[in-house]
Amino acid sequence: MMSPALPIEQHPSPNHGPRAPGKPIDILLLHYTGMASAGRALGWLCDPASQVSSHYLVFEDGRVAQLVDEARRAWHAGRSTWAGETDINSRSIGIEIANPGHQFGYRAFPEPQIDALIALCRAVLSRHPIPPERVLAHSDVAPERKEDPGELFPWQRLHQASIGHWVPPAPIVAGPLVKRGDRGNAVLILQQRFRDYGYDIGEEAEFGAKTEAVVTAFQRHFRPKRVDGIADVSTVTTLDRLIVAIPAKA
């Protein structure tokens, strides 16, 4: 049961189906709505024509709506991959966070909204054994398509509330970097590091569009001070620290 401290409005969406058998719910996926208003986003998530939905929607004023029962497969991740898994919808809980997004005037997430999101995430995590490192951004699982919830999202604040995996970003300093157009062993090592964490990236002989998209997505989540798709010392050091800090499996 949801905590009485977090009232949940019910706005059932018809856009859901059965989860694939044999797949545990082990990902919590956070999005922003990316629409001009939360009302339009709610309408779209509940419109049969849209073929999209999420389990929850968190409004800027802190209200929370449930659209799809957690037992069902909501349609929020789209074409996405994490740690080799391509059916992210079957093994995730999806939360949409009302925000206009980069297209309609991206802005900071209000305190009441984040407070409500933290309470909601805690409730979800109490029901599902989701590891911290699998609390993810939509951009993590779909780096070539998505930017949300973006570089203004307060991942550190969630981590302080025991939600998600995070380390302090390494300082931005001068030093070697790997960037678009580079080739060679440094590129292959970089790609392997991102695969080790879970990102979907193959062995490109050249630092191309896919690698740049993954670096950019990583920066939005873990090193938001500079989001440029360049694997500088800060980016790579932060990635290595995250890999080392992944909690050991029991």
Image (cartoon, rainbow, N blue to C red):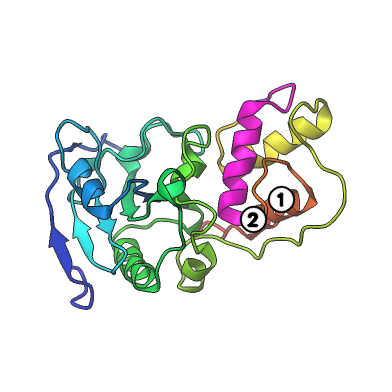
Q: Position of residue 159 (x, y in %)?
A: 50, 67
- Label 1 crowd bin: few (<14), some (14–19), many (20+), radius 10 Å: many
Q: Quadrant of residue 17?
A: top left
Lateral position of residue 95 relative to residue 5, left or right: right
Whether residue 24 is visible to the viewer of this picture, yes or no, is: no
Residue at horizontal 51%, vertical 38%?
83
Query: Are the residues tagged 2 and 1 within 8 Å (C-beta)?
Result: yes
- Label 2 crowd bin: few (<14), some (14–19), many (20+), radius 10 Å: many
Q: Earlier in the sequence, mark 2 or mark 1?
A: 2
Q: Magenta segment: does it hold 215?
A: yes
Lateral position of residue 177 relative to residue 203, left or right: right
- Foreground residue, 3 or 215? 215
Which residue in the structure is indicated by mark 2?
223
Q: Position of residue 227 (x, y in %)?
A: 64, 48
Amino acid type shown at disc 2: Arg
Amino acid type shown at disc 1: Thr
Residue at horizontal 45%, vertical 73%?
161
Numbered tag placed on residue 235 in the rendering = 1
Residue at horizontal 81%, vertical 25%?
183
- Stretch of the chain drawn in magenta: 202-225
Residue at horizontal 17%, vertical 30%?
49
Q: Magenta segment: does it hold 146?
A: no
Numbered tag placed on residue 162 in the rendering = none
Q: Quadrant of residue 244?
A: bottom right
**Quick one: SS at disc 2?**
loop
Q: Is residue 227 above or below residue 8?
A: above
**Quick one: SS at disc 1?**
helix
The residue positioned farthest toward the right in the image shown: 175
Spatial CA distance of label 2 from label 1 is 7 Å
Q: Is residue 44 above or below residue 185?
A: below
Whether residue 65 is visible to the viewer of this picture, yes or no, is: yes
Q: Position of residue 220 (x, y in %)?
A: 57, 50
